[in-house]
Image: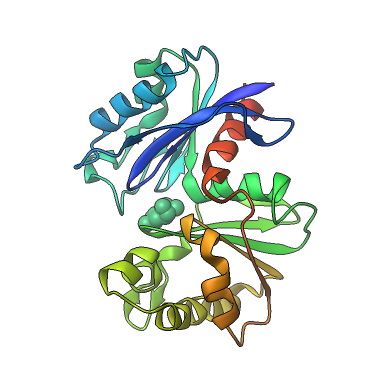
Amino acid sequence: MNVFGVDIGGSGIKGAPVNLERGDLAEPRHKVLTPHPATPDDVAGCVREVVGNFGWNGPVGITFPGVVTDGVTRTAANVDKGWIDVDARALLGDRLGLPVTVLNDADAAGVAEMTFGAGAGRKGVVFLLTFGTGIGSALFIDGKLVPNTELGHLELNGHDAEKHASTKAKEDEDLSWQHWAHRVQKYLAHVEMLFSPELFIIGGGVSRKAEKFLPLIEGVRAEIVPAQLQNNAGIVGAAMAAGASS
Ligand code: BGC
């Protein structure tokens, strides 16, 4: 079965029909640039453009880069604050005229990785962490998601961790791989101190360059592996969530 997945990110809004048996895109994805400011209304227009591009008529799963409880977006660290307490399921569903499921972006990526990627078959405590504009977290216990964990906002050296260790921080501060890997290492050690996971899966666009920084990370007991679905994990996970609730 195919279900449509959309990933709302800080720089792009992308989507495609997803083959749920294979866990990959059934057609090449379509992407539009995220509007600035990323208000609910403008983002909803972009989502409509992405879905409309395929003439899609069926359930749609949509990721959001903030806390989502029962279809309502609760936080907005890297998008317009107008998203706080919006019934995103109703807003996006009305705009598309289709049934939609909305969930946190890291949770969606995590669900996809635990089924089709680096976490497949893994039991125990597993984290997927996405490094991008922010840091997203998805916690799994024996394969079951604990949603909305928000560990990107742990305090690290007196900072919001994502301000210090996201790939945006690397770019903004022009950090070397060595310097940034050191910050990521400190962050992982902190999460490990709190949760003792068996596995960290490192996602986000930077997972494509895992060989540049993962070998530099030392002193973390847990296994650390790059995500396998890379930039499509959010789209696939969003479609899986919509498929499960339709
Ligand atoms: C948000 C999370 C999101 C992460 C990655 C953070 O700033 O609070 O909800 O998963 O960024 O987009």
**Residue 191, position as x, y percentages in the image:** 54, 74
Q: Residue at point 33% right, 64% down?
A: 168
Q: At 46% from the left edge and 40% from the top edge, which residue is drawn?
A: 69
Which residue is located at x 64 percent, y 44 percent? 112
Q: Quadrant of residue 77?
A: bottom left
- Looking at the rendered image, the quarter that the N terminus falls into is top right
Above or below 81: residue 56: above
Residue 24 in view here: yes
| Left or right: where 8 falls relative to 231 | left
Q: On screen, 171 above or below 187?
A: above
Task: Depth check: give the residue in front, 185 or 174.
Answer: 174
In the picture, the quarter occupied by the C terminus is top right
Question: Measured from the top left, where is residue 201 in percent x and y?
Answer: 62, 62
The outermost residue toward the left is: 37
Q: Is residue 108 visible?
A: no
Which x, y percent locates residue 76? 31, 49
Q: Nearer the viewer, residue 244 or 35?
A: 35
**Mark count:** 0
Task: Name the quadrant containing residue 93.
Answer: top left
Which residue is nearer to you in this view: 171 or 89? 171
Q: Is residue 76 left or right of residue 25?
A: left
Is 221 positioned to the left or the right of 93 in the image? right
Asked if 216 appears above or below 102 in the picture, the reply is below
Which quadrant of the render holds ligand 1? bottom left
Q: Residue at x 68, y 68 (%)?
A: 199
Report the colour scheme.
Answer: rainbow
Q: Is residue 157 above or below residue 242?
A: below
